[in-house]
Amino acid sequence: MRKYSVFAVAREAMRAHKGWEAQWVSPEPRASYDAIIIGGGGHGLGAAYYLAKEHGITNVAVLEKGWLGGGNTGRNTTIIRSNYLYDESMDIYEHSLKLWENLSQDLNYNVMYSPRGVMMLSHGIHDQQVFKRHIHANRLYGIDNEWLSPEQAKEFCPPLDISASARFPINGAALQRRGGTARHDAVAWGYARAASDRGVHIIQNCEVTGIRRGPDGVVTGVDTNRGFIGAKRIGVSASGHNSVIMAMAGVRVPLHSVPLQALVSEPLKPIFPCVVMSNTVHAYISQSDKGELVIGAGTDQYNSYSQTGGLQIITHTLDAICELFPIFRRVKMMRQWGGITDNTPDRSAIQGVTPVPNLYVNCGWGTGGFKATPGSAHLFAHLIAKGEPHRLAAGLTLDRFRSGRLIDEAAAAAVAH
Amino acid sequence: MLLIHCPYCEEERSELEFRAAGDAHIARPENIAAISDEDFEAYFFLRDNPKGLIFERWRHVAGCGRFFNAARDTVSDRFLKTYKAGEPKPQLPIAAMTDETVVETYEATEGRAE
């Protein structure tokens, strides 16, 4: 792999950019691998990268039924933050945030991580109490989070309407300054390039249709549309399709898949300096480096794999955006799309062993998986390599729904999906 | 937005009037305090989350207020049948699932990555 640098850009500028090589190779699959990861999104590609980099396991394949990052990795609103309430959540999201901070250097790929601040609006005394509880919990845990007055919030985000006559009056905000955004495509591509460089096989257009197990129950490989591929260990990280994949191994998981929508506006000049979220009226918004306002809508209420969603979900969010930021009322929306999120009953992810030996699962990231990408991938690689969870992911087990040790971020969510 | 036929009102109404209420035909164990943790997990948390035919509950909250059941395809979101609570799962011909309408999944519209 040739290193990307300012010198590489200068060199290629001198020769009409004819020297760039493919970012990753797409080899024919081998007959078998030490580990197979199902799902070529950020989590899966990242896990393959960390398997190779930190655990020396390079005989690894990532199987992706479509194209890299074509699922939720390329469909989210790219928000990064770690101001969750419970220890288990703070552990993994803060681990992730720390990896985000150095990810571009680590991968030699500009993922455009931008710690521009994530500000959560408080619209009443209840919001204020909940957010202050989060702030205190975060700060006790060593995570930055602070309370802003409405005036400070307006100063941090000038388009915000804080007038007393606003439809949704604001009595303060919680701000995590280290939160921000990153470029989602670059995350998938950067991990793919770095993993491929270490010998990982990245196999697109390869849909898993079955998981085979030996007489002792241990996984032996996967059936795909490109034939059988053997595997000593399998990691499942298939986002909205995790239930479908796990059913192939006879494992039922506590997930339901629902569409989550997002949309972008026409490009504008830089006007929106941060990320703003509002739990109460359900809106979140930031501005991409291309200039589009990136707006996240809500989930549909029913199970679906359709990658679409109801228009009323979008209009509900846009109603709120127009009230919070009247300046955007005449902005045209350009594109809208949906992704299928896999949600757990407690809205916390599952990462751990399964009842099937050597089958590991990374699922249930629901509506907030992008921010977790590096941390989740890093800890998932540890799980696959060692056969047991990393300390920071020890609470995210699949069997917590049997033991009752839930991590109830559902009640503590920043946005009420 | 979905159009949903309420089997009680016998009318097709907008999704705005309805609330989805999870999987149908899940019987609460009568001896719930006595069942094992595994059985409780299976009853309370584990779901098939099918890609394809699902049986689910809906409630016509802004109409008659009653719960009813539906059979729906989770890929096309098309309702195959709605029926009153307490009625058994309908037998649906397989053909009902083969969907002639084009759905904008990325598999359907984008096909294979080049």
Image (cartoon, coloured by chain):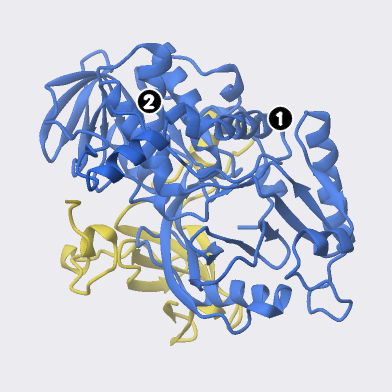
Which of the 4 image quarters holds residue A49? top left
Residue A150 located left or right of residue A270: right
Q: Which mark is residue A398?
A: none
* Residue A130 image offset from top left, x and y in percent: 82, 50
* Residue B89 image offset from top left, x and y in percent: 35, 61
Camera sees residue A359 = yes
- Identify residue for label 2: A49
Which of the 4 image quarters holds residue A323? bottom right
Local secondary structure at mark 2: helix
Residue A348 higher or lower than B2, as above or below: above
- Identify residue for label 1: A87
Q: Nearer the viewer, residue B36 or A68?
A: A68
Camera sees residue B35 = no
Q: Three-letter amino acid code at disc 1?
A: Asp
Local secondary structure at mark 1: helix
Which of the 4 image quarters holds residue B56? bottom left
Q: Nearer the viewer, residue A303 or A50?
A: A50
Residue at 22% across, 48% down: A16
Which chain gets the blue colouring? A
Label 2 marks a residue whose chain is A
Q: Nearer the viewer, residue A408 or A172?
A: A172
Residue at 20% across, 33% down: A25
Count neighbours of disc 1 (C-alpha within 10 A) and say few if under 14, some if 14 to 19, many if 20 or more. some
Q: Three-letter amino acid code at disc 2?
A: Tyr
Q: Quadrant of the N terminus of chain A?
A: top left
Label 1 marks a residue whose chain is A
Q: Colour of chain B?
A: yellow
* Residue B102 image offset from top left, x and y in percent: 22, 72
